[in-house]
Amino acid sequence: MSQNTINNERVRQYQKVHQNEKEQLQNLVFKKSYSIKSASMLLNIKYATAKSIISKIRKSKIKKYLFLNKKLKQCSFKKVEFFKPKLEIKSLVAGSLINECTYYLY
């Protein structure tokens, strides 16, 4: 056998999926909680094709979410300590705490 025929046997056939089938797949997987495998079997789409379609949809949604968050510049939370405690005074009477006071360094 020649090298071209061996290479042609290894190449998988591409399955073209129409836009309405992609939307149906998206609806089944995300809204109706079907697995990718069962949704692909219902729509008669190869599992590998369905998996790649779903991964592209997920990536596009993540990119849109990141773009919106950068655009809105939402606030973020960060732990900040302005003062370090200098002195703590605790008043104990018979082992029970009566008063506690903390003095900070400015």
Image: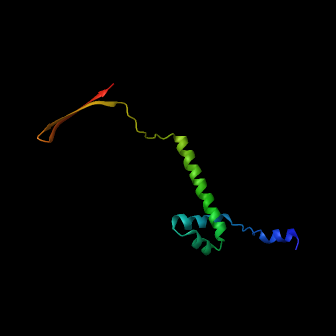
Between residue 65 and residue 94, name the one nearer to us.
94
Answer left or right for 81 relative to 60: left
| Count of marks placed on residues | 0
Q: Residue at x 57, y 54 (%)?
A: 61
Q: Residue at x 74, y 67 (%)?
A: 14
Residue at the front extreme, as displayed: 95
Vertical order, 72 against 87 (above or below) = below
Answer left or right for 83 relative to 99: right
Q: Horizontal and vertical percent for residue 51?
A: 62, 65
Q: Horizontal and vertical percent for residue 25?
A: 60, 67
Between residue 78 and residue 15, name the one nearer to us.
78
Residue at the top extreme, as displayed: 106
Give the position of the N terminus as an image quadrant. bottom right
Q: Residue at x 61, y 75 (%)?
A: 41
The part of the image, by quadrant, that contains residue 54 is bottom right
Q: Horizontal and vertical percent for residue 65?
A: 55, 49
Give the position of the C terminus as an image quadrant. top left
Residue at the left extreme, as displayed: 94
Residue at the right extreme, as displayed: 2
